[in-house]
Image (spheres, rainbow, N blue to C red):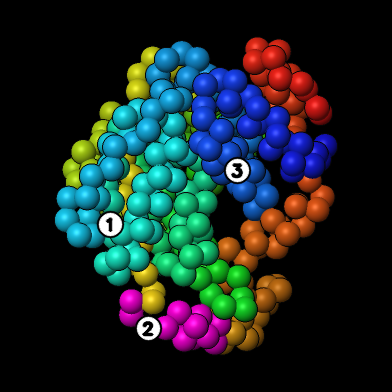
Amino acid sequence: MKFPVETIRTFGEAVSVKAGMSPENAKIFIDNMINADLRNVRSHGITKFRGYLSRVEYGVSDIRAEPTIVRTAPAALAVDGNNGMGTTIAWKAMEACIETARENGVAFATIKNASHHGFGGYYVMHAAEQGMIAFEVCNSPKLVAPFGGAKPLLGTNPMSIAIPAGRRPMLVCDMATSVVAKGKIALAIKEGRSIPDTWALDAEGRKTTDPVAANTGVLLPFGGPKGYALALIIDVLCHSLAGANDSQHIPRVFENLEEPSNIGYCMCVIDISKFLPLAEFQQSVDDLFDSIKACPPAEGSTGVLIPGEIEYAAAQKNREDGIELSEPVLKEFRELSEKYQVDYPF
C-alpha cells in the first residue's frame, strides 16, 4: 500500500528527534531514505529505519555525534565520523567538500569511524545540484567473493557518481560492485520473496533463490574480474587511505549490534565553473546525452537510457502517488510509534 511522502517524512523525523537526533540531522536522515524510495531503490529506503535505530538503542551508533573535519591541505579533508549516524557524517563531509571545491576547484575527503550512510546517490546528487561533479565510494562488510574465490572477503563496496546537465536530468550512477546490493537480499528476507539465482551462492557454493541461504552464503561481483577489481580498489581507498576497517573487519551492520562499524568513505567534488562556464558544460552534456539517446534501439529494447533516467522518472511519479510500505515495515512503524510515543498516522 502507498502512503503520502509527507506523512512518512513527518513520522520519521518525529521518531528520530525523540530518539535523540537533532532536528537538522533528522531531516537529512529521513530525507535520504525517502529519496531512495522515491527512486525505487527500496533496499536503501525507509525499510532501513528500524535497523538504524536498533543500533542506537544497543549503543553501537551515537545518534548525537558530529563528525570532526580537518582541512589537511587546501583541497584535502580528513574526517573522523566519531561513530555517529552515517547520514550525518556523509552529509556534513559532502558539504565540506562542496565548500572546499568552491575555493580550490576540487576537494577530496577521506572519512573513518563512519557507519552505514544509506543511499549514496543522495550526497553526490546534492553536489551536482550546485554545479559540481561528485564521486563517493564506501566499503562494507565482507559478503562478496573475490573473482575466482569461494569465500567472502570483500564488501559490496558501492560507488556513486553524479554529473549535472542542463535541460536534461543529471546523470546518476549509484551501484554496488556486487551483482546486487546486500539491502536487496535483506528486503527479500523481510518480505518473504525469492531472489534470482544469479545474485548469490549458498554456503555450499551453489546457486540459490532463497535470500536466507544467500545471506549466509556469498554474493558475486558484477562483471566477474571487473567488479572484483573495483571492489578491491574501493577497499584500499576506504581502509588503507582513510584509516577505517577493511571489509573483512567491518561487522554486519544490521545483524551485529555489539560492535561499531568503522566504515570508510572517500569523496571527491569538482567545481565545474573553475574549468569552464557551467552553462557551457551543461550544454555540452545535453548535446552528448542527445546523441546517446538518438542511438537506434536494439531488438527488444525500447531505447537507450542515461544512467539515473529510470530512477528520475520513478521519483516524479512516486512524489504524486506516494511510497510503497510493506506490512513488515508498517509493523515496525507501529512498534516505533509505541516506543517513542509518536502518533501512528498510517
Magenta span includes 283: yes
Residue named by callout 1: 108
In this picture, is 232 found above or below 74? above
Q: Which residue is mark 3?
A: 31
Chief secondary structure of the magenta span?
helix
Residue type at tag 3 = Asp
Q: Where's the C terminus, which quadrant?
A: top right
Q: Secondary structure at mark 3?
A: helix
Spot occupied by residue 281 in the image (x, y as percentages of width and height): 45, 82
Q: How many marks?
A: 3
Residue at x 34% of width, y 55% of height:
97
Which mark, by number, is residue 306? none
Tag 1: amino acid: Phe
The image shows residue 293 at horizontal and vertical percentages of 61, 81
Report how far apart the C-alphas of labels 3 and 2 lie in the structure. 32 Å
Q: Are marks 1 and 2 in contact (CB under 8 Å)?
A: no
Front-most of 262 and 251?
262
Spatial distance from mark 1 to mark 3, Cα to Cα? 24 Å
Crowding at label 2, few (<14), some or many (≥20) Cα neighbours within 10 Å? few
Q: Is residue 98 above or below residue 68?
A: below
Which stretch is magenta? 274-288
Whichever of labels 1 and 3 marks the residue nearer the N terminus, that label is 3
